[in-house]
Amino acid sequence: MTRVDAVSKRYGFGRWVLRDVNLEVAAGEIVAIVGGNGSGKSTLLRMLVGLSRPTSGTVSGRPEVVGYVPDKFPSNERLSATAYLGHMGRIRGLSTHDALSKAVRLLDRLALVGGADTPLRTLSKGNAQKVALAQALMIQPQLLVLDEPWSGLDASAHGVLGDIISEVAGAGGVVVFTDHREQITRAHASRSYGISEGRVALRSLGQTVEIGATVEIVLAKRAIAEETEWSDSPGVLAVTENGELVTISVTLADSDALLLAALNQGWSVKSVTERGDAG
């Protein structure tokens, strides 16, 4: 069992990012960490996997094999996806043959666009995320930690990721993930924690995050419009596509930034409607 006991974190003499965090994750559990942008979710995950030390408190019981997918994957390497994963597999003790074989199987399962020999630096965000997932699975993880793992993935990969999470937990591993969408948390987590003002508290899976007023924005795709993963934008709660129209539900605080991004990327704004308090 991995335990976080009275953990607090700040960087230098800055504000406290997390204060007196206590949680534990046991074999077979799938735990969601939910909170707004900048709430400390990524900081907590980095401490779980051992990439960052608490300012105070302890993290104990971390298993030997940990798989980690960060929120930003450095995909500007000259290596191909297969070569990169083969290298990561060898670092973790696999033979060259076994590492490359595992890499090809994982990339095939995740349906990497362009194939396993595609250079990392040419990958879209969603396909880079598939490589990030694959590197975390080169060795069967006992603790799998995923920071916004669905970000940018296509619909088919969404389902594959859900299956992978269930398989890791079913084999006795622990999965901890973050996501800002309530429907993802309800679909995959057996337990959920919320972060607010640096404090972490257990939530019911049906409990919503206090997000205040929301805005519904309807965009129309023009010929010059850039392809955009709107679900990855800050504050976005839901995205619905209907032909050339995209309807986005976003927090009021993030709506101006999304509108500016849409206009800069060549989209046409059809309507903007404030929906009041979403709870």
Image: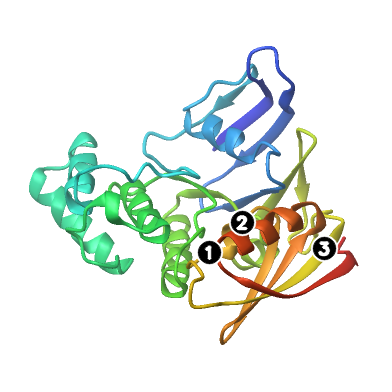
Task: Give the label on residue 57, or none.
Answer: none
**Which is more N-terminal, label 2 or label 3?**
3
Question: Could you tell me how many numbered marks the image carries?
Answer: 3
Q: Are marks 1 and 2 in contact (CB under 8 Å)?
A: yes
Residue 179 percent coordinates (x, y): 61, 54
- At 55% from the left and 62% from the top, the residue drawn is 265
Circle 2 SS class: loop
Q: Is residue 62 above or below residue 75?
A: above
Q: Are marks 1 and 3 in contact (CB under 8 Å)?
A: no
Q: Is residue 152 above or below residue 223?
A: above
Q: Residue furthest left?
A: 97
Q: Residue furthest right?
A: 276
Judging depth in this view, the residue of 245 and 164 nearest the camera is 245
**Which is more N-terminal, label 3 or label 1?**
3
Q: CA distance from mark 1 to mark 3?
A: 19 Å
Dot 1 crowding, Cα within 10 Å, few <14, some 14–19, many 20+: some
Residue tagged 3: 214
Q: At label 1, which amino acid type do we have?
A: Glu
Residue 43 percent coordinates (x, y): 59, 33
Q: At label 3, which amino acid type do we have?
A: Thr
Circle 3 SS class: strand
Q: CA distance from mark 3 to mark 2?
A: 14 Å
Q: At label 2, which amino acid type do we have?
A: Ser
Residue tagged 2: 233
Left or right placement of residue 238 versus residue 78 in this view: right
